[in-house]
Image: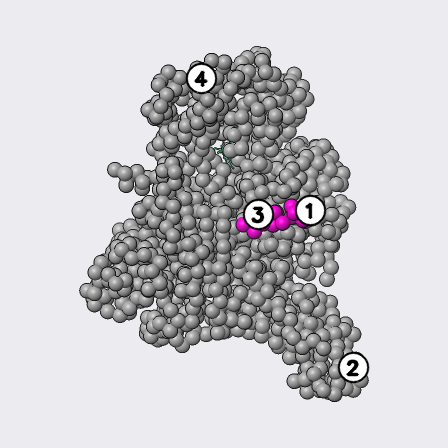
Amino acid sequence: MVTRKPHIVGKPFPRVEAELKVSGRSRYIDDIRFGPDLLHACLVPSTEAHAALLRVDVSAAREMPGVVKVLTGQDFTAWLGLFLKDRPLLADDRVRYVGQPVAVVVAESREIAKRAASSVMVEYKSMPASLDVMAGIEADAALVHPELASYEGLEHVTPITGTNVGDHVQLQWGDMEAGWADADVVIEHTYKVGRLYHASLEPHGAVAKMEDGRMTLWASIQRPYTHRTMIAQALGLEPGQLRVIAPCVGGGFGGKAFPCIEAIVAAVARELPGRPIKLVLDRRQEFACAFMRPGLTARLKAGVRRDGVITALKAAYYWNVGASVDAAIRVVRGAVLAGAGPYKTPNCEVESYAVYTHEPPAGPMRGNGMAELHWAVEQHIDRLADAIGMDRLAFRLQNLVKGGDRLYGGRVMHATGLETCVRGAAEAIAWSEQSKSLAGDGRKVYGKGLAAMWNPVVAMQPLGVTALVTLDNERICTVSVGGVESGQGIYTLAVQLVASELGVPHSNVHFERVDTERGSLDWTATSGHLTWTMGNAVVRAAQDVKRQVLSFVAQAWDEPIGNLDIIEGVIVSYSPTSERTLNLTDLLSEGIATADSERVRPSFEGKGFFQATGRPALDSGDEEPRIPPIIHFSTGAQAVEVEIDVETGVTRVLQMAPAFDVGHALNPDIVRAQIKGGSVQGLGMALLEQIRFDHGFPLNRTFKDYNIATIQDIPKRIDPIIVEVPQDDGPYGARGIGEHVLIPTAPAIASAISNALGIYLDELPLTAEKIWQALEIQDT
Amino acid sequence: MVIYIKFGCNAIRRIPEMNEWTYSDFYLERGGNLHPFDYAKPTSLAEARTLLAQTAADGVVLAGGSDVLRRIEEEVIRPQVLIDIKGLPELRGISFSVHGGLSLGATTTISALAAHNDVRRHYSLLVKASHQLGSLRIRNRATVGGNICVALPQTDLPPALLCYDATCHLLGPEGERTVPLSECYKGTRQTALEPGELLVRVTLPAPAAYSYGAYHTVRQGGQTTVVGAAVLARRASGPSTEWRIALAAAAPYPLRAYEAETHLASAEPGAAMVEKAAELAMRAAQPADDIRASARYRRSMVGVLVRRGIEEVIEQLSGRGR
Amino acid sequence: MKHQITCKINDEVTRMEVESHRTLLDALREDLGLVGAKHACVSGECGSCNILFDGEVVSACMILAVEADGAEIITVEGLAESERLHALQKAFLDHNALQCGFCSSGMLVSSYALLQSVSRPNEQEIRAALEGNLCRCTGYADIIKAVQVASRARR
Ligand SMILES: Cc1cc2nc3c(=O)[nH]c(=O)nc-3n(C[C@H](O)[C@H](O)[C@H](O)COP(=O)(O)OP(=O)(O)OC[C@H]3O[C@@H](n4cnc5c(N)ncnc54)[C@H](O)[C@@H]3O)c2cc1C
Ligand SMILES: Cc1cc2nc3c(=O)[nH]c(=O)nc-3n(C[C@H](O)[C@H](O)[C@H](O)COP(=O)(O)OP(=O)(O)OC[C@H]3O[C@@H](n4cnc5c(N)ncnc54)[C@H](O)[C@@H]3O)c2cc1C
């Protein structure tokens, strides 16, 4: 008799959806057929950053044969927003950014829709636009939302009325005066990050159909439940009237976490009941009409003593949220909670401002603001260390937050592997050995850099998550969760956890794609903590279903339930008298004779619910009602070595050693894959990526000029280091990983560049030309 | 629940992953990305000439399509007819003779060019430039003629062709004529081709007894050359060396740096000669500011890349016992 | 204008009627249901719609369907032999060489073409073969590994 539990958690394990993907059989939104009734939508995007709409002439479009409907902002008055409704479905009386949908055309074919859309005449009256964050907070700036004070949802945010500040928060602890007085050196500097594009390979796409008063929306999205709530609200539907289904999703990175075109498609479908409406963006529209990562201007001022103690830190974060702050509220709020970086800061003042500009709306991207924020903090830490002549690694090690340290507001830091990560990463690139400073021909220089990070898991909404595990004869075991598989491997984890908890071979466990009708509510679904929230719910659901099975069998066998277990798919009895066994599959297919000798073929449904609570030690308390509780911090570090061609400025990353504390690596292969992928995304962000605007007009709207890292840009070696300090309320001790991996890479690369050249670069990206320019200035 | 998807008219496949929400009646009409046009594929030059004359401004020549289709998709151009020239035998193939030189049919793909043995042996700079052009899937379609006729500054092959003194053979309503490649460019997206004229082939003079070329570029992430410099040295039998320098993305079109070439041919060898030549090349450049780089950076990079190219070539020459 | 074309797709002779302006990608996806090749940029920039065209990798979005008359085409759907995955597909699966999967078809087709011409490619050759294929998820390293593993498995 087998008595050992199969241990498939913590082991490599192939991705459950990978076979479909490698054989080209996965169905993404654009691959699904919707029948001959399908209609096609096309958007008419604004070409102005800020203008009054004098006239939207759709008459030519309406008359085109094959055009079914043309709708403008006059037809929809609804606004979208989860916290603050600051996004009209279609432009109302004015446009607020280039690319804002002004009208939508629906036609029998995509070609007709496209042609009709380009025949829509829009008459604009240009108005001054506010395109700079710092100028935008001044009193005389052009306002993006003059009527902000009347918007719905103000109870969630704190705008400064009459300005472009859509939300702001502040946090202060310790004694700033004393901190400044204690400092030997005070350094003040401003750091900048421009707008970035999520660039998932699959563009946004949605199909909606209204039938018998109920709507179904199929869409490439990351959070079906968030979409359902927001879109139902905007359209005046009950959540139950809207069914949201997420097919295979080709990447998201935060860009698909909030509705954009999906809401428009749904609104159109409501006008045209009975026919499915489809809109899949092409790449140029995708750049223009979807979300962009917020930009950041960070002003940091810090005091440090010669012995390496940070005495005071004042940080002000100004987020460029474009024309909408709603999707970026967590970014803005999270910034004060993590705004001092993962360092001991007894005296600190952090402010965070969301500043509206006439640019595309902000959508959070992988890291939820933390990548932008650490760009500033980590570079400032380098400057502080350099100013007192201390090694950058030693300075970090001295100041890193450790488990048990007191944070602000009486909070106490939980156990963390941060220091292990920093040491491990540094060691992996042989930190103590200086880089070859000058190569033979003097044209190449080398440098090493390091950055640490922490990422607070912030509970903006109640993090309620349910999972279902069903057992039936047809599919044996099915796990259904509310989070979407967008590449991170979440279904594989779910299958692994169920197999392990229930005691069945993983080949018996199937996953189900998200369908809000089938109910596994999940509000989180992104943000690198699905593993933790969904994982907990899945474990509980599996335990629930197992209890049901065992009690059913216990009754039939007339044995105490405590005698029974499921091992490798076999229900076994440990009773010393009866050594009975029964295959779970047999139970499901043939049933079991009950005590009154009637054969019953059972099926079971187990439910698991997980509700994260702000833990007392990290709870914000009543005095800061608008600051959400932090659940825990994920931590990690990145170390890199770079080679710079000093004549051209071209920088190559030679090696990366990313290290992250994941609590417990439920599937080490997937964790390593996340770390590598995030590191390379960070590399692109550091060296290449930025949307360039000309008077609010995004210039690079294709991959030709918005360069993400290619296979030729990656270093020869990326060696992920997994650190495991268990999370006490995580499934098997796990924390998430997906978001964190992006955060420390850009500052680590900047750190290596300043190590090599003695030049600090404060604005991303670090293009060849920018480095060349800095070297030229240094020379003169 | 098992769902069957009908593919096309007869094949039926089972899609195990599909949930019950998939419609079972299948007809996927997404519609195209391109506005409607007609397509013609002439099989003889005469037929092509007639077509070109008939369609005039409404017809556009289609070679590899890597530029044309993109511009149609972006709605920069809206031709009525695409005239596919890949069926014309005269525009195909590579031929070489030691005395006659190299002849490249206009529809030769970049991949075919780079793989050709005689090209590899005698015109290796073309191979180096080819390897920088886009990625394999582009090189497998893009043609030599197309890379010339787009007349874009950042094209990678023309600088190398300029170094080999390439000549374009054009065929139009008035008959055939030849134009040196260096005189083919009139501006960005403007060539010396008259309406209705086709580039039939490009010829390169017989290879020198010895030649060596270098192609250096600044390219970072992505596929476009920010600046490029091709440098070629040729020797007949004697010790005198002939130099060629041509630039990519440093002017409205691919450009030769004549003064720099002359300087190299006449000046005393040494570091000063190289510096001076690089400086002359910088002066010849007429770079523009654009999203990829500033004019200042481009000009400065011309200096760096030309110097590196010359140095590489000199090192190679001296390796052969100067 | 409509054209009758005949080509061999994944070893099956296929006749189609296509409009002049239809791209090969649209014809494959919509007329034949071969949706493995993806619409991701439709301007030749990302490699997600790569197919083999007369033995060479090309982007199906940058070719007209009429140009495929007489051509031999292999798509990702044609890599597996009957129900057995190709060594590359197996290696991609085993080595985490995919995440969201949207670029995978193109990656696999490009890698397949590489292995047709170089049986044991080194890292540099793999990079060169895949430089036109964008991936936002994996960071490429595991893709390189998978191609190497597959090349060894095949011998
Ligand atoms: C993703 C991508 C990356 C690229 N990267 C590079 C790169 O790195 N370097 C580079 O140089 N280029 C690059 N290109 C550009 C492109 O491949 C070249 O310009 C290519 O050589 C064009 O050739 P084609 O055969 O595809 O031309 P087509 O697109 O068929 O035609 C181009 C133009 O030339 C005209 N034309 C073509 N042949 C003739 C002829 N024989 N007679 C008269 N007119 C003719 C056509 O009418 C059209 O106007 C890239 C393109 C893409 C899509
Ligand atoms: C991913 C990708 C990569 C490509 N890479 C290349 C490539 O490397 N080479 C190539 O030939 N084609 C390349 N192409 C194809 C070709 O670039 C497009 O057909 C072309 O970019 C269209 O140019 P445009 O419409 O942006 O600019 P156009 O207006 O057609 O041309 C202007 C271009 O020329 C440049 N320019 C103009 N004047 C000057 C000057 N005085 N000095 C310097 N530069 C000047 C500008 O940078 C601008 O990009 C690529 C296409 C893609 C999709």
In magenta stretch: residue A307:
no
Q: Nearer the viewer, mark 1 or mark 3?
A: 1
Q: Is mark 2 within 8 Å of ligand 1?
A: no
Q: Which residue is mark 2?
A: A593
Q: Secondary structure at mark 2?
A: strand
Q: Are marks 3 and 2 on the same chain?
A: no
From mark 1 to mark 3, how far is it between C-alphas? 16 Å
Report the colour scheme: one colour
The magenta stretch is C141-155
Q: Is mark 1 within 8 Å of ligand 1?
A: no
- Dot 1 amino acid type: Arg
Image height check: is A724 above or below A365? below
Q: Are marks 3 and 4 on the same chain?
A: no
From mark 1 to mark 2, how far is it between C-alphas? 52 Å
Residue A288: where, in percent of width, then height? 46, 46
Residues under numbered marks 3 and 2 in contact, where contact means CB atoms less than 8 Å apart: no
Q: Which residue is mark 1?
A: C154
State which quadrant residue A271 falls in: bottom right
Q: Quadrant of the N terminus of chain B?
A: bottom right
Q: Which residue is mark 3?
A: C144
Q: Main secondary structure of the magenta part?
A: helix
From mark 3 to mark 2, how far is it between C-alphas? 55 Å
From mark 2 to mark 4, how far is it between C-alphas? 97 Å
| Tally of marks | 4
From mark 4 to mark 1, how far is it between C-alphas? 50 Å
Mark sitting earlier along the chain (1/3): 3
